[in-house]
Amino acid sequence: MFQRQERMIALTFDDGPLPGPTNEILDILSENQSRATFFVLGNNVTKHRDVTRRIVREGHDIGVHSFSHPNFQETEIYEVYRELIDSTLLLEDLLGILVKYVRPPYGFSTAETQFLFDQIGLQSILWTYDTLDWEILNAEQIASNLLENIQAGDIVLLHDIHPTTIQAMRIAIPKLVDQGYKLVTISEWLEVQENPFK
Ligand SMILES: [Zn+2]
C-alpha cells in the first residue's frame, strides 16, 4: 500500500511487447526496483509470448491496447468489441490473470466504446504526461524533457518499441529513483488516487 505523500509516478509502455526493447525495459526496471504498466497489442502477444509472461512474472501490470491498433473512433462498434475481447481473452488464457485496464489506441474513444469498456470490465487509463517519444526519437531529449517536467502523480505515456525510448529510460529511471520518486504500476497508483479518466 502506497501513501498519498509518496512521490509516485506510473510509467506506461504502449504498442509492445517486442522481445528486444521490452526485455531491455524490464531489465532496467528490475535493476532499479521499479514497476510499470504495459498496454500490449494482441498481435504482438501472439508472436512474443515469453516476454509477455515475463512482464507479469516480474510484478508489472499488463493491460490491453487492442489487437491491431485501430482508431476506435473510426471503427464499427462490433469490430471494437472483437479487438477488446480477442486481446483480453488471449492475455487471460496465456497468463491466468484478470485483465483490468485498457488504453485505447491514440487515446481515442467514444461514449459507445466507453460503454463497451464498462461491459467488459475494463477501466480506461490515459495519461497525464506525454513524452512524445515516438516523434522525438532522441534519447537525451526525451529523458531531459521528462526529468524537467514530470510531477508526482503523473501517468507517463511511452512506447516500448523504439530503441531511443529504451535509451531514454536508461538515463531517466535511475535519476527519478534518486530523486525519491517511486515508480509504480497502475494498480498501485489507483490504490491511492481516483481514476481521472472515467
Ligand atoms: Zn499505441
Image: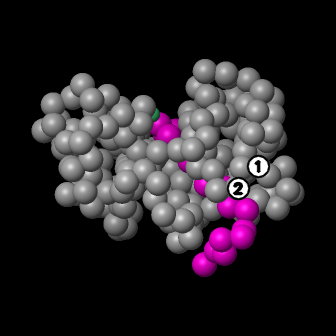
Q: Residue at x 41, y 45 (%)?
A: 103
Image coords of residue 42 (percent x, y): 34, 43
Answer with the quadrant where ligand 1 appears in the image.
top left
Q: Residue at x 37, y 54 (%)?
A: 198
Q: CA distance from mark 1 to mark 2?
A: 14 Å
**Mark 1 residue type:** Ile
Magenta range? 1-19
Which residue does the numbered mark 2 point to in the structure image?
A: 152
Left or right, 78 with respect to 25, comes to left
The N terminus lies in quadrant:
bottom right
The residue sitting at the bottom extreme is 1
Left or right, 54 with respect to 107, comes to right
On whether residue 17 falls in the magenta region, the answer is yes
How packed is label 2: few (under 14 Cα within 10 Å), some, or many (20 or more)? few
Residue 54 visible in rendering: no
Say which quarter of the image contains residue 162: top right
Task: Determine whether the residue tagged by mark 2 lies in a helix, strand or loop.
Answer: loop
